[in-house]
Amino acid sequence: MEATKGYRALLKNLPMSPSKIRPIANHIRRKSYIDAIAILDAFPQKGAGYLKKAIQSAAANAMYQDQNLDEESLFVTELLVDGGPSRTTIWPRSHGRADRQIKRSSHIRVVLDHKVVE
């Protein structure tokens, strides 16, 4: 994967399936930082909290690395929700059978960049 310019944050091994987080992530791609946080505050899903945490972490990294940066100039350039390691548990059933439950996890990668004002 090509290295992307910008300010990054990575959340790993979140205890939630990527298929539950991706629809929320589709709403905030290529939005400004302020708009993305406002949209995520309106969502009731648990995955919105994880995405908000990742975006705020990337913004904090940006503010730390560049002291002259303001929040209004940041926007989400890249937002990836990938699958993490899966854990299987066995449920005993009648007649010696067993069911498997797959507990999925996610990795979230956020890249923020600033707009150049001309």
Image (spheres, grey):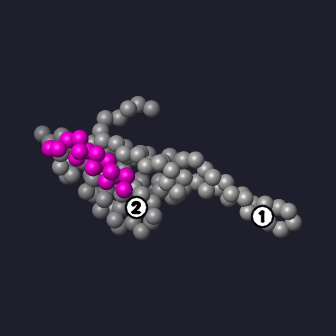
Assess whether mark 1 and mark 2 are in contact (beta carbons under 8 angstroms). no
Residue with the mark numbered 1: 92
- Which amino acid type is shown beneath numbered disc 1? Pro
Q: Amino acid at mark 2?
A: Gly
Crowdedness near tag 1: few (<14), some (14–19) or many (≥20) residues, C-alpha within 10 Å:
few
Q: Residue furthest front?
A: 64
Label 1: element kind: strand
| Label 2 residue SS | helix
Write the residue at 63% across / 52% down.
Answer: 87
Is residue 55 one of those drawn in magenta? yes
Q: Residue furthest left?
A: 118
In-front residue for pair 23/13: 13
Residue for point 47% across, 48% down? 12
Q: Residues within 10 Å of mark 2 (few under 14, many from 20)?
A: some
Coordinates of residue 68 in the picture (x, y in percent): 14, 44
Separation of disc 2 and disc 1 at Cα? 34 Å
Q: Is residue 75 at least partly visible in the picture?
A: no
Q: Give the residue pinned by disc 2.
A: 49
First in sequence: mark 2 vs mark 1: 2
Residue 78 is drawn in which quadrant? top left
Looking at the image, is mark 2 or mark 1 nearer the viewer?
Answer: 1
